[in-house]
Image (cartoon, helix red, strand yellow):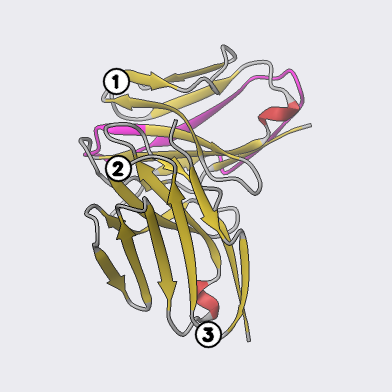
């Protein structure tokens, strides 16, 4: 049973650089979510997809952030011109879709912007 | 927007002791989820509660939902070092992505 996979696990970058993270959800899951978590806080919703359609984006997702799920399978989250405030754990989750369904989370990508 | 408040923020208990973590919602709860997170890792699903008065148990962990009070509690009996971690409650506000509390950090000491 392969769970949600995220790559890389850790990323260190310099301010101003672009970074891209990848998430592979559980294969039969239609919904894919991105959350961001900073130290001492709970995960904050960023965006989610139903198959390849991006259905909702949080106000936290500035125009430097872009997410895609081109074939309704894996997803990428790109951050352009990174800032120190972008340092966080980026979590991906997937679910079968529909109401009141539990989310399965990946191990996250820890981003450090120097 | 819906907000979840967890209490306490952190907790240190001696191994073998019982403990309770609370989660209070600012809005009506359509579903309440409990997750556990090890430091630097992803979230592991524990339990989901959907109906007022519902109570679920898994091993030594019991969760209850008080829909009228818009509140849930998580109770651990006879705590063990393996219970240490961050416990997060998440709320389903009705066809919206889960909103999470800030978490309760549990340490279990021998």
Q: Is residue B98 left or right of residue B105?
A: left
Q: Is residue B94 magenta?
A: no
Q: Is A41 on the left or on the right of A48, as rendered?
A: right
Q: What residue do we see at 36% from left, 30% from top?
A: A74
- Count of residue discs: 3
Q: Chain of mark 3?
A: B
* Residue A79 coordinates in the image, percent (x, y): 59, 21
Which of the chains bears the disc numbered 2?
Answer: A
* Residue carrying label 1: A52
Q: What residue span does the magenta drawing correspond to?
A: A8-32
User: Is residue A9 covered in magenta?
Assistant: yes
- Badge 1 sits on which subunit? A
In depth, the one of A43 and A65 nearer the eye is A43
Residue B29, percent from left and from top: 32, 45
- Quarter of the image containing the C terminus of chain B? bottom right
Pointer 3 residue: B17
- Quarter the N terminus of chain B occupies: top left
Residue under numbered circle 2? A26
Secondary structure, mark 3, is loop
Q: Nearer the viewer, mark 3 or mark 2?
A: 3
Identify the element where label 2 is drawn: loop
Mark before the other along the chain sequence, 1 or 2: 2
């Amino acid at each position: 049973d392969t769970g949600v996979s995220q790559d890389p696990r850790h990323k260190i970058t310099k301010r101003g650089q672009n970074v891209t993270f990848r998430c592979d959800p559980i294969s039969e899951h239609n919904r894919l979510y991105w959350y961001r978590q900073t130290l001492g806080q709970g995960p904050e919703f960023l965006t989610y997809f139903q198959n390849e359609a991006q259905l909702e984006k949080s106000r936290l997702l500035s125009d430097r952030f872009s997410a895609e799920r081109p074939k309704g399978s894996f997803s990428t989250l790109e951050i352009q011109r990174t800032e120190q405030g972008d340092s966080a754990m980026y979590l991906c989750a997937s679910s079968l879709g529909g109401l009141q369904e539990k989310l399965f989370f990946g191990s996250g990508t820890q981003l450090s912007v120097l | 927007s819906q907000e979840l408040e967890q209490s306490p923020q952190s907790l240190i208990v001696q191994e073998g002791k019982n403990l309770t973590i609370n989660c209070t919602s600012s809005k009506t709860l359509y579903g309440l989820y409990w997750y556990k997170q090890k430091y630097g890792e992803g979230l592991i699903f524990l339990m989901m509660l959907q109906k007022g008065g519902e109570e679920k148990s898994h091993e030594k962990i019991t969760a209850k939902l008080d829909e009228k009070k818009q509140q849930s509690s998580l109770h651990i009996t006879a705590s063990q070092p393996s219970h240490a971690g961050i416990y997060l409650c998440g709320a389903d506000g009705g066809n919206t992505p889960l909103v999470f509390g800030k978490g309760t950090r549990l340490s279990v000491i021998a």
